[in-house]
Image (tube, rainbow, N blue to C red):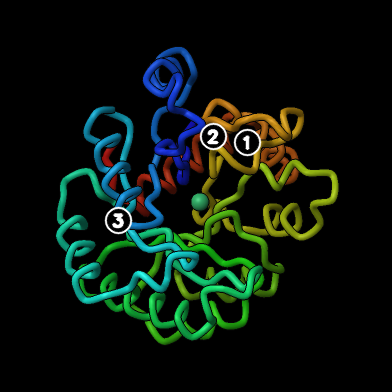
Amino acid sequence: MFDSHAHYDDRLYDADREELLGRLFGQGGVTGVVAIGCDLASSRAAIALAEAHGGMYAAVGLHPEHAEALSPALLAELETMLGQQKVVSLGEIGLDYHYETPSRDAQKAAFRAQLALAERTGMPVSIHDRDAHGDVLAILREFPNVTGVLHSFSGSVELAKELVKMGWYLSFSGVLTFKNARQAPEVAAWVPSDRYLVETDAPYLTPVPHRGERNDSGMLRYTLQKLAEVRGVPFETAERETEENARRLFRIES
Ligand SMILES: [Zn+2]
Protein backbone atom coordinates (compact mmCIF):
# COMPACT_ATOMS: atom_id res chain seq x y z
CA MET A 1 0.00 0.00 0.00
CA PHE A 2 1.39 3.40 -1.03
CA ASP A 3 0.30 6.41 1.05
CA SER A 4 0.58 9.46 -1.22
CA HIS A 5 -0.06 12.06 1.53
CA ALA A 6 0.64 11.93 5.28
CA HIS A 7 1.84 14.25 8.06
CA TYR A 8 4.11 12.12 10.25
CA ASP A 9 5.84 15.22 11.64
CA ASP A 10 2.61 15.91 13.59
CA ARG A 11 3.05 15.98 17.36
CA LEU A 12 0.36 13.27 17.66
CA TYR A 13 3.16 10.85 16.68
CA ASP A 14 5.77 12.19 19.09
CA ALA A 15 5.28 9.38 21.61
CA ASP A 16 5.62 6.44 19.18
CA ARG A 17 6.68 7.71 15.73
CA GLU A 18 9.66 5.40 15.13
CA GLU A 19 7.94 2.33 16.54
CA LEU A 20 4.82 3.02 14.43
CA LEU A 21 6.75 3.60 11.18
CA GLY A 22 8.88 0.51 11.83
CA ARG A 23 5.74 -1.57 12.20
CA LEU A 24 3.97 -0.07 9.17
CA PHE A 25 6.95 -0.65 6.86
CA GLY A 26 7.54 -4.09 8.41
CA GLN A 27 4.44 -6.23 8.98
CA GLY A 28 2.00 -3.42 8.17
CA GLY A 29 1.97 -3.87 4.40
CA VAL A 30 3.02 -0.27 3.70
CA THR A 31 5.49 0.04 0.81
CA GLY A 32 5.69 3.82 0.44
CA VAL A 33 4.71 7.08 2.11
CA VAL A 34 5.03 10.68 0.94
CA ALA A 35 5.56 12.88 4.01
CA ILE A 36 4.04 16.28 3.29
CA GLY A 37 5.32 19.72 4.26
CA CYS A 38 3.08 22.72 5.01
CA ASP A 39 5.72 25.35 5.79
CA LEU A 40 9.52 25.44 6.00
CA ALA A 41 9.72 23.68 9.39
CA SER A 42 7.41 20.79 8.43
CA SER A 43 9.10 20.52 5.02
CA ARG A 44 12.46 20.10 6.79
CA ALA A 45 10.85 17.53 9.09
CA ALA A 46 9.44 15.65 6.09
CA ILE A 47 12.91 15.48 4.52
CA ALA A 48 14.43 14.22 7.79
CA LEU A 49 11.78 11.46 7.99
CA ALA A 50 12.40 10.50 4.36
CA GLU A 51 16.13 10.30 4.97
CA ALA A 52 15.57 8.02 7.99
CA HIS A 53 13.14 5.56 6.34
CA GLY A 54 13.74 3.69 3.09
CA GLY A 55 10.11 3.73 1.93
CA MET A 56 9.51 7.32 2.85
CA TYR A 57 9.69 10.31 0.49
CA ALA A 58 9.10 14.02 1.05
CA ALA A 59 7.04 16.84 -0.40
CA VAL A 60 8.00 20.42 0.45
CA GLY A 61 5.84 23.52 0.12
CA LEU A 62 3.77 26.29 1.66
CA HIS A 63 0.16 25.36 2.56
CA PRO A 64 -2.42 28.10 1.78
CA GLU A 65 -3.00 28.42 5.53
CA HIS A 66 0.56 29.82 5.76
CA ALA A 67 0.39 31.87 2.52
CA GLU A 68 1.45 35.08 4.27
CA ALA A 69 4.90 33.59 4.89
CA LEU A 70 5.64 33.79 1.15
CA SER A 71 8.92 35.61 0.41
CA PRO A 72 11.75 35.40 -2.13
CA ALA A 73 13.93 33.80 0.59
CA LEU A 74 11.30 31.13 1.29
CA LEU A 75 10.97 30.32 -2.41
CA ALA A 76 14.74 30.06 -2.70
CA GLU A 77 14.87 27.65 0.23
CA LEU A 78 12.05 25.52 -1.25
CA GLU A 79 13.95 25.39 -4.53
CA THR A 80 17.06 24.14 -2.74
CA MET A 81 14.99 21.50 -0.91
CA LEU A 82 13.41 20.36 -4.21
CA GLY A 83 16.89 19.38 -5.38
CA GLN A 84 17.39 16.92 -2.52
CA GLN A 85 17.38 13.23 -3.32
CA LYS A 86 14.24 12.02 -1.52
CA VAL A 87 12.10 15.05 -2.31
CA VAL A 88 9.53 13.91 -4.90
CA SER A 89 6.88 16.66 -4.93
CA LEU A 90 6.15 20.33 -4.32
CA GLY A 91 3.33 20.51 -1.78
CA GLU A 92 1.03 20.80 -0.27
CA ILE A 93 0.06 24.05 -1.98
CA GLY A 94 -3.28 25.42 -3.15
CA LEU A 95 -6.30 27.36 -1.96
CA ASP A 96 -8.45 26.99 1.16
CA TYR A 97 -11.55 29.19 1.31
CA HIS A 98 -13.03 27.43 4.34
CA TYR A 99 -11.79 30.21 6.61
CA GLU A 100 -11.49 33.94 5.87
CA THR A 101 -7.75 34.13 6.54
CA PRO A 102 -5.25 34.38 4.96
CA SER A 103 -6.87 36.58 2.31
CA ARG A 104 -7.73 34.98 -1.01
CA ASP A 105 -5.27 37.34 -2.72
CA ALA A 106 -2.43 36.19 -0.44
CA GLN A 107 -3.34 32.54 -1.07
CA LYS A 108 -3.45 33.01 -4.84
CA ALA A 109 -0.07 34.78 -4.82
CA ALA A 110 1.57 31.92 -2.89
CA PHE A 111 -0.13 29.33 -5.14
CA ARG A 112 0.99 31.01 -8.38
CA ALA A 113 4.55 31.58 -7.13
CA GLN A 114 4.92 27.90 -6.22
CA LEU A 115 3.34 26.65 -9.47
CA ALA A 116 5.90 28.79 -11.29
CA LEU A 117 8.59 27.06 -9.21
CA ALA A 118 7.13 23.66 -10.15
CA GLU A 119 7.21 24.65 -13.81
CA ARG A 120 10.84 25.77 -13.57
CA THR A 121 11.98 22.64 -11.70
CA GLY A 122 9.72 20.09 -13.44
CA MET A 123 8.44 18.79 -10.08
CA PRO A 124 5.01 17.17 -9.70
CA VAL A 125 2.74 19.09 -7.34
CA SER A 126 0.44 18.03 -4.44
CA ILE A 127 -2.61 20.29 -4.37
CA HIS A 128 -4.84 21.25 -1.44
CA ASP A 129 -8.26 22.50 -2.66
CA ARG A 130 -10.90 23.20 -0.04
CA ASP A 131 -14.06 25.04 -1.11
CA ALA A 132 -12.05 26.68 -3.92
CA HIS A 133 -12.65 24.45 -6.97
CA GLY A 134 -13.28 27.29 -9.48
CA ASP A 135 -10.18 29.30 -8.63
CA VAL A 136 -7.95 26.20 -8.35
CA LEU A 137 -8.98 25.05 -11.84
CA ALA A 138 -8.53 28.55 -13.31
CA ILE A 139 -5.03 28.93 -11.82
CA LEU A 140 -3.95 25.39 -12.83
CA ARG A 141 -4.94 26.29 -16.40
CA GLU A 142 -2.38 29.13 -16.27
CA PHE A 143 0.35 26.44 -15.85
CA PRO A 144 -0.33 23.85 -18.58
CA ASN A 145 3.14 22.30 -18.16
CA VAL A 146 2.59 21.48 -14.48
CA THR A 147 0.85 18.33 -13.26
CA GLY A 148 0.53 16.40 -10.04
CA VAL A 149 -2.23 15.24 -7.73
CA LEU A 150 -5.32 16.81 -6.18
CA HIS A 151 -5.10 15.47 -2.63
CA SER A 152 -8.29 14.16 -0.95
CA PHE A 153 -10.18 15.20 -4.06
CA SER A 154 -13.58 16.67 -3.16
CA GLY A 155 -14.93 17.90 -6.51
CA SER A 156 -17.56 16.63 -8.93
CA VAL A 157 -17.16 14.11 -11.75
CA GLU A 158 -17.29 17.08 -14.19
CA LEU A 159 -14.32 18.75 -12.47
CA ALA A 160 -12.52 15.39 -12.27
CA LYS A 161 -12.91 14.97 -16.04
CA GLU A 162 -11.40 18.41 -16.71
CA LEU A 163 -8.43 17.75 -14.42
CA VAL A 164 -7.71 14.29 -15.83
CA LYS A 165 -7.82 15.75 -19.34
CA MET A 166 -5.19 18.30 -18.19
CA GLY A 167 -2.94 15.45 -16.98
CA TRP A 168 -3.70 15.50 -13.25
CA TYR A 169 -4.11 12.58 -10.83
CA LEU A 170 -6.81 12.39 -8.13
CA SER A 171 -6.16 11.04 -4.64
CA PHE A 172 -8.77 9.47 -2.34
CA SER A 173 -8.67 9.61 1.45
CA GLY A 174 -10.75 8.16 4.29
CA VAL A 175 -13.49 10.64 3.32
CA LEU A 176 -14.44 8.04 0.68
CA THR A 177 -15.62 5.71 3.47
CA PHE A 178 -17.75 8.29 5.31
CA LYS A 179 -21.50 7.64 5.34
CA ASN A 180 -22.30 11.11 3.97
CA ALA A 181 -19.79 10.82 1.08
CA ARG A 182 -21.64 11.49 -2.17
CA GLN A 183 -19.29 12.86 -4.81
CA ALA A 184 -16.14 10.97 -3.84
CA PRO A 185 -17.60 7.48 -4.59
CA GLU A 186 -18.92 8.72 -7.95
CA VAL A 187 -15.54 10.14 -8.89
CA ALA A 188 -13.74 7.02 -7.62
CA ALA A 189 -15.98 4.82 -9.77
CA TRP A 190 -15.26 6.97 -12.84
CA VAL A 191 -11.54 7.80 -12.57
CA PRO A 192 -9.29 6.05 -15.15
CA SER A 193 -7.23 3.19 -13.68
CA ASP A 194 -3.96 5.03 -14.36
CA ARG A 195 -4.96 8.29 -12.63
CA TYR A 196 -5.93 7.57 -9.03
CA LEU A 197 -3.95 7.45 -5.81
CA VAL A 198 -4.81 6.62 -2.21
CA GLU A 199 -3.76 8.55 0.90
CA THR A 200 -4.39 8.87 4.62
CA ASP A 201 -3.73 12.60 5.22
CA ALA A 202 -2.73 11.12 8.60
CA PRO A 203 -3.27 12.01 11.40
CA TYR A 204 -6.53 13.40 9.93
CA LEU A 205 -9.42 11.93 7.87
CA THR A 206 -9.37 8.48 9.50
CA PRO A 207 -11.57 6.05 7.55
CA VAL A 208 -14.61 4.20 8.89
CA PRO A 209 -14.64 2.08 11.11
CA HIS A 210 -11.92 4.01 12.99
CA ARG A 211 -13.25 7.53 12.34
CA GLY A 212 -12.29 9.81 15.23
CA GLU A 213 -9.09 7.92 16.07
CA ARG A 214 -5.57 8.93 15.05
CA ASN A 215 -4.96 7.88 11.45
CA ASP A 216 -1.91 6.01 10.11
CA SER A 217 -0.91 4.39 6.81
CA GLY A 218 -2.12 0.95 7.94
CA MET A 219 -5.65 2.35 7.69
CA LEU A 220 -5.20 2.69 3.92
CA ARG A 221 -6.72 -0.79 3.70
CA TYR A 222 -10.21 0.56 4.50
CA THR A 223 -10.03 3.24 1.82
CA LEU A 224 -8.58 0.72 -0.66
CA GLN A 225 -11.43 -1.70 0.15
CA LYS A 226 -13.95 1.03 -0.62
CA LEU A 227 -12.09 1.98 -3.82
CA ALA A 228 -12.15 -1.67 -4.91
CA GLU A 229 -15.85 -1.95 -4.08
CA VAL A 230 -16.99 1.14 -6.01
CA ARG A 231 -14.73 0.29 -8.97
CA GLY A 232 -15.84 -3.35 -9.03
CA VAL A 233 -12.28 -4.75 -8.89
CA PRO A 234 -10.42 -6.96 -6.38
CA PHE A 235 -8.65 -5.25 -3.44
CA GLU A 236 -5.29 -6.31 -4.90
CA THR A 237 -6.04 -4.44 -8.14
CA ALA A 238 -6.79 -1.17 -6.33
CA GLU A 239 -3.70 -1.68 -4.15
CA ARG A 240 -1.44 -2.36 -7.16
CA GLU A 241 -2.85 0.41 -9.38
CA THR A 242 -2.59 3.11 -6.69
CA GLU A 243 1.01 2.10 -5.99
CA GLU A 244 2.00 2.01 -9.69
CA ASN A 245 0.34 5.38 -10.24
CA ALA A 246 2.07 6.99 -7.26
CA ARG A 247 5.47 5.67 -8.37
CA ARG A 248 4.91 6.93 -11.93
CA LEU A 249 3.74 10.39 -10.79
CA PHE A 250 6.49 10.86 -8.17
CA ARG A 251 9.14 9.09 -10.31
CA ILE A 252 10.00 6.52 -7.64
CA GLU A 253 11.40 3.19 -8.80
CA SER A 254 9.99 -0.04 -7.35
ZN1 LIG B 1 -2.47 17.27 4.16
Q: Where's residue 139, x and y in %? A: 47, 83
Q: Quadrant of the C terminus?
A: top left
Q: Which residue is mark 1?
A: 224
Res. 140 in view: no
What residue appears at the point 67 percent right and 31 percent down from the top-left corner?
222
For the point 66% across and 71% down, the residue is 131
Q: Is residue 186 above or below residue 174?
A: below
Front-most of residues 146 and 109: 109
The secondary structure type at the circle numbered 3 is: helix
Of the pair 237 and 218, the residue shown nearer to us: 218
Frontmost of labels 3 and 1 is 3
Reading the image, the residue beneath label 2 is 239
Separation of residues labelled 1 and 2 (CA atoms): 6 Å
Q: Residues within 10 Å of mark 2 (few under 14, many from 20)?
A: many
In the figure, is residue 82 to the left or right of 153?
Answer: left
**Above/below status of 144 relative to 252:** below
Q: Nearer the viewer, mark 3 or mark 2?
A: 3
Question: Where is 224 relative to 196, above or below?
Answer: above
Kind of residue at disc 2: Glu
Name the residue type under label 1: Leu
Left or right of 9 in this view: 77: left
Q: Residue extending furthest top?
A: 27
Mark 3 lies on residue: 40
